[in-house]
Image: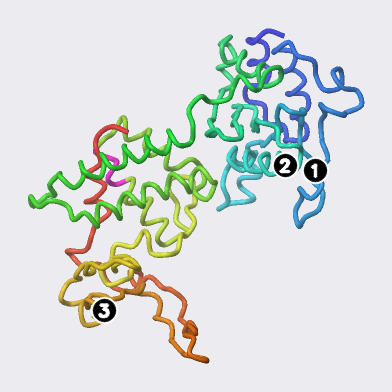
Amino acid sequence: MTPEAFIAKWRGVELSERAASQDHFNELCALLDVKKPTDADSLGVWFTFEKPVPGGGKGGGGGFADVWRKDCFVWEYKRRKKPREAAEEKGKPEYRTIAAALAQARDYAALLENPPLVIACDIDQIVVRTLFTGSVSVTHTIKLIDLNDSAQRDLLRRCFTDPASLRPEITPQAVTEQAATKLASLAQTLRERRDRIGQAHDPRRVAHFLNKIVFCLFAEDSGLLPGGVFSAIIEEAQRDHAGLTTMLADLFDGMRHGKRRFGTVQIPWFNGGLFCNSPRCGCWATPPGSTGPASTPPSSARSSNAASTRPSARRWPISSTPPRLRYRGGVPQIKARRTSPIRCLCAEVPTQRNAPSAKALASTIPNHR
């Protein structure tokens, strides 16, 4: 089969996952000039469809990997919802996401002798993620139209014949060092830039903003933030720098309150106060173990939050209470007091004019990634 014929056949196909997956995989094998599972292993010992996964199903029951090739990969299919399904399930994500398929494939891989690759496919694209021990995880995305490119077909072929060739050369330590260097440089740049009234940004506000950014990267990669929404914001910001402020502010606001839409994606609620900007809640309290004073809220908020701004030798989180110290036989016994559920007061207190603003902070991002 030629790449042109394969692309023409599978472009716009709306068959269900079960109806499309095996035919698609068999024809992809023909395109890559590798044997399909039933030809390579008629007994299903090392290369097979619907590989049983003990303990891989819901509630600890059995599951099935769509395709498994020993020492190579676990392959999972996910299909886009049909328009009728999307209408019937209004309010739910439009896609059975690639991220969800990759997460499922990774869970299966741990129960199927840990192959070095997990692969997810929704017909329109194929996503390959490496899982080599002692190496960073790298993701390769191949669109349907990209199969015209011989280099992309070769990458897919090596998933079958030589998966070790996809091992990244960079180490986790090197990636961590690079990320830390870039974040430190970005933090310094943000601290040095001036706001609209000519004042340098408070280092704590810069740190708070960067924590939001890092969390969004984590949440999207782990599937907590659906629809690739954060990546879409960054891509759009390359074309429209001025729009970054509004997009980030809307996303942070959605994550703060939950059950809000960002385009077609419904944003879930993230608790803990990270996306709060009110100076009256614990988001701006001094972290546990810090010896410096907490940031001072406006005078209208001081009376209600005096404990969080009063200097002390030992500081505790604003949402908790120091434990009681008792002695038994001369030995100190610590017993934690009961604490009420942590609540972010920003949903209850009107925003102060001089409160940290996500929009103001977002405007300080450099015009490049």
Residue that appears at 65% across and 33% down: 118
Furthest-left residue in this view: 198
Mark 3: which amino acid? Answer: Asn
Mark 1: which amino acid? Answer: Val
Q: Which label is found at residue 305?
A: 3
Q: Position of residue 327 (x, y in %)?
A: 47, 90
Q: Is residue 86 left or right of residue 281?
A: right
Give yes or no for residue 243 being in the magenta stretch.
yes
Most common secondary structure along the magenta stretch: helix
Q: Position of residue 332 (x, y in %)?
A: 47, 85
Query: Badge 2: few (under 14), some or many (20 or more) residues near its Cα, within 10 Å?
Result: many
Mark 2: which amino acid? Answer: Tyr
Is the C-beta separation of discs 3 and 2 under 8 Å?
A: no
Q: CA distance from mark 3 to mark 2?
A: 49 Å
Say above or below: 350 vs 337. Answer: above
Q: Which label is found at residue 108?
A: 2
Q: In the figure, residue 282 lies in which quadrant?
A: bottom left
| Residues shaded magenta | 242-246
Q: Mark 3 or mark 1, which has the lower sequence index?
A: 1
Q: Which label is found at residue 53?
A: 1
Q: Secondary structure at mark 1?
A: strand
Q: CA distance from mark 2 to mark 1?
A: 7 Å
Residue that appears at 83% across and 27% down: 46
- In the picture, the quarter occupied by the C terminus is top left
Query: Badge 3: few (under 14), some or many (20 or more) residues near its Cα, within 10 Å?
Result: some
Query: Badge 1: few (under 14), some or many (20 or more) residues near its Cα, within 10 Å?
Result: some
Is the C-beta separation of discs 2 and 1 under 8 Å?
A: yes
